[in-house]
């Protein structure tokens, strides 16, 4: 079972017990549980459900493991013959989370939805 969820404006393919780094979530403290309800796709044993744009009733629950910074990226600017040099570093802040559960309530497989739509068209 997996899901595609939007977290802080970016899309991630997640599975249960998976750990991943997302852009820093300022509102979440370490060991706190957070819920993401912008689930774009859910894949279960029954089939795949694609949202329009999100799957109604689906949610992903995760635990915040901590806040970290990425490796330093050096930015070096230089203008030749002008004695101008600037060296700066940047470390992007991230939050490490662990996916605890993928709740697919209300998510009917896409194939079943297509069959229902075709049946409605045939009856009309």
Image (cartoon, rainbow, N blue to C red):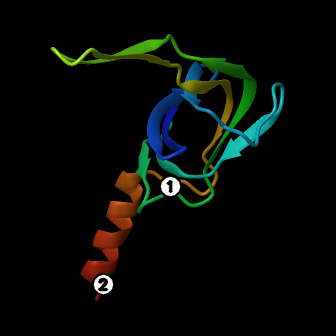
**Image check: 27 left or right of 72?**
right
Q: Residues within 10 Å of mark 2 (few under 14, many from 20)?
A: few
| SS at badge 2 | helix
- Displayed quadrant of residue 61: top right
**Image check: 43 left or right of 65?**
left
For the point 68% across and 33% down, which residue is it? 101
Q: Is residue 1 visible?
A: no
Q: Residues within 10 Å of mark 1 (few under 14, many from 20)?
A: some
From this viewpoint, which residue is outermost toward the left?
Answer: 81
- Residue 73: % across, % down: 42, 14
Foreground label between 1 and 2: 1
Dot 1 corresponds to which residue?
108
- Displayed quadrant of residue 25: top right
For the point 56% across and 30% down, which residue is it? 22
Q: How many marks?
A: 2
| SS at badge 1 | loop
């Amino acid at each position: 079972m997996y899901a595609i969820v939007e977290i802080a404006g970016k899309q991630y393919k997640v599975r249960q017990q998976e750990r991943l780094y997302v852009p820093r979530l300022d509102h979440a403290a370490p060991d706190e549980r957070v819920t993401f309800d912008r689930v774009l796709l859910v894949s279960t044993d029954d089939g795949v459900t694609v949202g329009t744009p999100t799957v109604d009733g689906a949610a992903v629950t995760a635990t915040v493991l901590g806040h970290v910074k990425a490796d330093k990226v050096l930015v070096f600017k230089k203008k030749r013959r002008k004695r101008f040099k600037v060296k700066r570093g940047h470390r992007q802040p991230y939050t490490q989370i662990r996916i605890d559960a993928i709740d697919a309530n209300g998510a009917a497989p896409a194939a079943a939805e297509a069959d229902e739509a075709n049946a409605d068209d045939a009856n009309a």
